[in-house]
Amino acid sequence: MEPKVFLDTDILVDFCASRDPWFPAAARVLNLAAHNKISAMTSAAGLKDVFYFARKPEGEAKARQIIYDLMKVIQVCEVNEAMWMEALKSPLTDTEDALQLACAIQNGAEYLITRNVKHYKKAKGITVLPPPALATLTVSDEFL
């Protein structure tokens, strides 16, 4: 069974906006999801942010297509009141990160993949890794 991996918003924005120098690592993560080597998920709140960042340079129609394509390979998890309550009580100083963490944990993610690992230093109940660390998981490196 493939690992359940929560993708932080920065990974998705890096991929969709082809942001250097982070695009290659983000592309490898999405490639793993597309080839069912990981079970990838993100929050509906994070996907909204991806749409916002994609819409600015790409326009409305292209941004919609980007979101549609992402939804083919990643599960979108709702954000609810319980997650907000958890985020507001979190020791994480950034509420957006705390909300992502609560969503990941409540949806059974084993790993949270983010470029900003330092933002999650106080996270408990999940392993937080940068994108290149996916190679340490028990997935085939055929797509890395």
Image: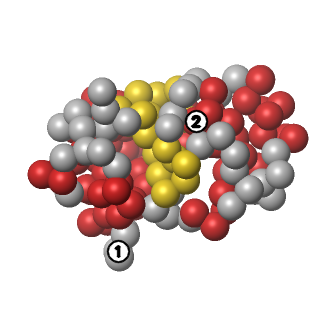
- From where the camera sits, is residue 139 visible? yes
Residue under pointer 2:
104
The amino acid pointed to by label 1 is Asp
- Determine the residue positioned at 55% across, 42% down: 46
In this view, 125 is above or below 27: above
Residue visible at 43% across and 40% down? 5
Front residue of this view, candidates 101 and 78:
101
> Can residue 56 be seen here?
no
Residue 108 shown left or right of residue 135 in the figure: right
Number of residues whose C-alpha sits closer than 10 Å to that of mark 1, classed few (under 14), some (14–19) or many (20 or more): few
Q: Quadrant of residue 79?
A: top right
In the rendered image, the quadrant that contains the N terminus is top left
Q: Position of residue 54 (x, y in %)?
A: 41, 52
Find out whether the residues at labels 2 and 1 contact each other: C-beta distance under 8 Å. no
User: Under tag 1, what secondary structure?
Assistant: loop
Image height check: is 90 above or below 4? Answer: below
Return the residue nearer the eye: 99 or 49: 99
The reply, left or right, for residue 44 in relation to residue 142 is right
Instruction: Give the residue furthest to the right.
Output: 89
Q: Which residue is mark 1?
A: 20
